[in-house]
Amino acid sequence: MSDGGHILAELHTKETFMQNHGIASAFVDAKKGFVTFSFNNVQPGTYAIMVMHDLNGNNQMDFEANGM
């Protein structure tokens, strides 16, 4: 990870995983080293967290011409 942009995190249930949005989201400024997220009022259960470093601030996953 590097400084610059934001780190976006989405909390997902089995039903929302790999869909557009999770049940909660958070973002923090990117900092070299580590960042911390908190999701409030989450019921006990099994969840997945999807995380993305949005370096250019456009709030989406960017791809190269080759799809990577």
Image: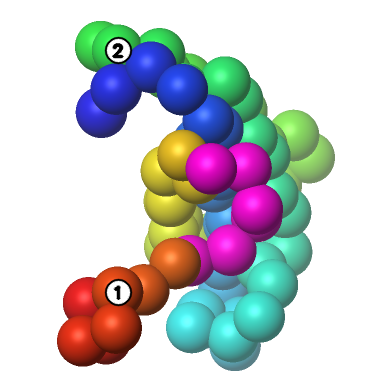
Which residue, given by chain and number where applicable, does mark 2 sit on? 32
Residue 64, quarter of picture: bottom left
> Which quadrant of the rendered structure holds the C terminus?
bottom left
Do we see residue 34 in this rendering? no
Mark 2 is on which residue type?
A: Lys
**Badge 1: few (under 14), some or many (20 or more) residues near its Cα, within 10 Å?**
few
- Give me the residue at 64% from left, 35% from top: 27
**Mark positioned earlier in the residue sequence (2 or 1):** 2
Return the residue at label 1: 64
**Residue 67: x percent and y percent?**
27, 86
| SS assignment for the magenta stretch, majority | loop
The image shows residue 58, relative to residue 2, as above or below, that is below
Q: The magenta stretch spans which residues?
A: 56-61
Task: Give coordinates of residue 48: x percent, y percent.
Answer: 43, 62
Asked if the stretch drawn in magenta spans residue 58, the answer is yes
Query: Farthest residue in the right direction?
Result: 41
The percent position of residue 45, horizontal first and vertical second, equals 53, 60
Quadrant of the image occupied by residue 24: bottom right
**Label 2, label 1: how far apart the Cα atoms are:** 24 Å
Q: Position of residue 56 (x, y in %)?
A: 53, 43
